[in-house]
Image: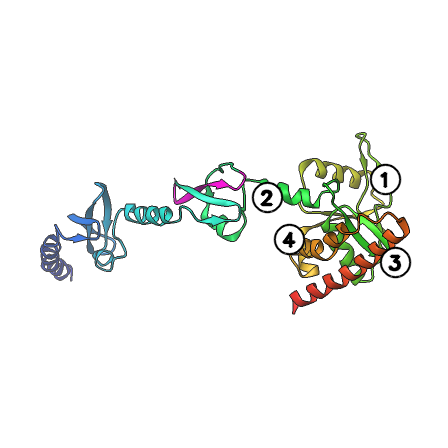
Amino acid sequence: MIVCTIDKDIIRYPKCEKKARARIGEVWGWLTIIDIKWNEKSERWDYVCLCKCGKTIKPIKYINLTSGKTKSCGCLKKEQSKKLAESRIGEVWGYLTIMTPVWNERQYFFTCLCKCGNTTNPIPYGCLVSGRTKSCGCFLVETCKRNCKNGKNRKFYYLSNDVYLKLASSYEIMYTMILDKQNINWKYEPKLFQLSNNTRYTPDFYLPDTNEIIEVKGHLNKKAKIKYDLFHMEYPKYKYKLVFQKELEDQLGIKCDKFLTYYDKYIEEPLKHIEHIADQQRYNDTVMDIVTKGYKQLWDVIYEQKS
């Protein structure tokens, strides 16, 4: 039995080696076969190749060469990625224009020129396409200014029980619409709380039926988080919840930027045209009419978005 097995190997091995060595010098893609090596585990000849870039790669299967699965040591893929990256120069995504591709270990990132004139750090292409990165940061600043309580000429009106209120941001407007739609009782900025670090905190909303404090935010910075955590620790009798932009969009069924665009169209812009009215009573009545009509149009848009 042993002699027969050895004889078979002796017969097969030289023939295979002769056939394998005959392939030395063949070129597949960017690879040239320069040597062969016996693979004891798989009982086959693997091939040592020299890449066009000058790098020698570890032994690979012949089928990987003939099928095109392996075309280079990896530099071909990088070269193709480079050409693709260079073809993307000049593309505009949000406020950003792609300027220079930068290789980052496994893929190309892109430095971009922002609309404001700043140059960004290298950004993954996926972040540009998905809209995750829209600017050097100025877009967020502009959005915050538009939503800011002290923004220039900014008015956020809401009609509640035939009384119009001035709210601090479009996020708060969206949340009041959600509360009213669900018939939840609410109070806006009901109370000022003194905290132990000599700061004061006025929550956005209070829900008396559930004894819940609600804070509505587009995003949460470190300073605000410290204040909220301190309030939660010092006033444990209140339930506390942070509501962020995504939850508002999911519940109301419209993106915040679109909501703000429609708010400006149906409420903000019409209000600008009545600032000349001197009579206070007439001005208040006109504001009431504009806000009432504006929110009806807003709800129509929201229902249309959902359908």
Mark nearer the viewer, 1 or 2: 2
Amino acid at pointer 2: Phe
Quarter-wise, where is residue 55 in the image?
A: top left
Amino acid at pointer 4: Asp
Name the residue beneath numbered marker 2.
139
Predominant SS of the magenta segment: strand
Give the residue drawn at x 67%, y 51%.
Answer: 245
Residues in magenta? 103-116
Does residue 268 appear left or right of residue 39 in this picture?
A: right
Query: Residue 282 at what x, y percent from top left?
Result: 88, 53
User: What mark, if any, has residue 257 been given in the picture?
Assistant: 4
Residue 1 or residue 109, whichever sits in front? 109
Query: Residue 94 at what x, y percent from top left?
Result: 53, 48
Name the residue beneath numbered marker 1.
192
Crowding at mark 3 (Cα within 10 Å: few <14, some 14-19, many 20+)? few
Q: Secondary structure at mark 4?
A: helix
How many discs appear?
4
Q: Earlier in the sequence, mark 2 or mark 3?
A: 2
Does residue 36 appear left or right of residue 163 in this picture?
A: left
Q: Earlier in the sequence, mark 3 or mark 1?
A: 3
Decide: marks 3, 1 in contact (CB < 8 A)?
no
Amino acid at pointer 1: Leu
Cα distance in 3D space between marks 4 and 3: 27 Å
